[in-house]
C-alpha cells in the first residue's frame, strides 16, 4: 500500500447507522477507494448461521439474533487489522458492542432522514423489524432509540441526504483527512 489515496494497512473504519442508509453499499465503495478489505457483519452472520437475518428473527426472535450479532462482531473485529466494516443497524443496542467498535477504529455514522430511509426500504421484505402493521411508526421508534447511540460512538457523522454513494465516500474521506487519489 502506501500510494496516494490509500489508507494505512491498519486503518479501520466501522460504518454505523439505521437500516436502509447504505452501510453495505457505501462500505464496499469506501473499501475499494481505500484498497482495504470489506467486511459486512450481516453477511457474515448469514454465512456463519446458514440462514437469513429475517429467518433468524422469525424463528428465534430479536434477542437471539442480537446475541449472534455480537458474537459475529467480536469475531470480525478480532481477525482484521485494516478493513472497512458495515455493521447491522441494531449493533449499537449493546453497550459492549459500542465499546468494541469505538476502541477498534474510526466510527462513521451514516445518517439520513426518516422519509429517505422509508423510500429506500419500501418493498424490501428482508427487513424483519419493519414487517409489522405500522412500519413508519416502527422506524420512527427505532431511530429515536438508536440515533443517540450512533451519535455516542461516532467519530464522524455524514448526512447522506440526497447524496450518491461516491459523494458519501468522498465526504467520509474529506472528514477523515484521507487524501484524494
Image (cartoon, grey):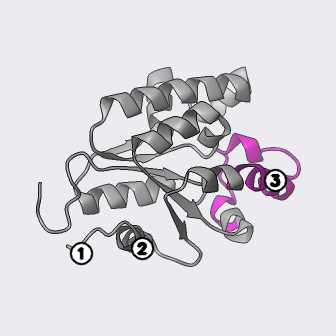
User: Which of the pair 11/167 is nearer the observer?
Assistant: 11
Image quadrant holding the N terminus, namely bottom left
Instruction: Determine the residue positioned at 62% across, 23% down.
Output: 67
- Magenta span: predominant SS is helix
Expressed as whole percent of the image width and height from the top left, the position of residue 85 reads: 41, 46
Q: Which mark is residue 24?
A: none
Q: Which residue is mark 3?
A: 135
Instruction: Determine the residue positioned at 41% across, 70% down.
Output: 175
Q: Which residue is mark 1?
A: 180
Q: Which residue is mark 2?
A: 171
Crowd around label 2: few <14 · some 14–19 · many ≥20 (10 Å):
some
In the rendered view, does 151 fall on the left or right side of 133? left
Seen in the picture, residue 65 relative to 31 is either above or below; the reply is above
Seen in the picture, residue 11 relative to 120 is either above or below; the reply is above
Crowd around label 1: few <14 · some 14–19 · many ≥20 (10 Å):
few
State which region is magenta. 119-147
Q: Is residue 22 visible to the viewer in this orientation of the structure?
A: no
Q: Which comes before the other along the chain, label 1 or label 2?
A: 2
Instruction: Determine the residue positioned at 61% across, 46% down.
Output: 89
In the rendered view, does 141 fall on the left or right side of 147? right
Q: Are marks 3 and 1 in contact (CB under 8 Å)?
A: no
> How far apart are labels 3 and 2 at the CA level?
30 Å
Expressed as whole percent of the image width and height from the top left, the position of residue 141 reads: 82, 52
Amino acid at each position: 500500500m502506501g500510494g496516494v489515496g490509500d489508507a494505512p494497512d491498519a486503518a479501520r473504519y466501522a460504518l454505523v447507522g439505521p437500516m436502509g442508509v447504505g452501510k453495505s453499499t457505501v462500505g464496499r465503495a469506501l473499501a475499494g477507494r481505500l484498497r482495504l478489505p470489506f467486511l459486512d457483519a450481516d453477511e457474515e452472520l448469514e454465512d456463519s448461521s446458514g440462514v437469513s437475518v429475517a429467518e433468524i428473527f422469525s424463528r428465534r426472535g430479536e434477542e437471539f439474533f442480537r446475541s449472534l450479532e455480537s458474537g459475529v462482531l467480536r469475531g470480525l473485529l478480532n481477525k482484521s487489522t485494516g478493513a472497512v466494516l458495515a455493521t447491522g443497524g441494531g449493533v449499537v443496542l449493546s453497550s459492549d458492542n459500542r465499546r468494541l467498535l469505538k476502541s477498534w477504529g474510526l466510527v462513521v455514522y451514516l445518517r439520513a432522514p426518516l422519509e429517505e430511509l422509508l423510500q429506500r426500504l419500501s418493498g424490501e421484505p428482508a427487513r424483519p423489524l419493519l414487517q409489522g402493521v405500522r412500519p413508519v411508526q416502527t422506524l420512527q421508534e427505532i431511530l429515536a432509540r438508536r440515533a443517540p447511540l450512533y451519535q455516542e460512538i461516532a467519530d464522524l457523522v455524514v448526512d447522506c441526504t440526497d447524496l450518491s454513494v461516491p459523494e458519501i465516500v468522498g465526504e467520509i474521506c474529506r472528514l477523515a483527512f484521507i487524501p484524494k487519489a
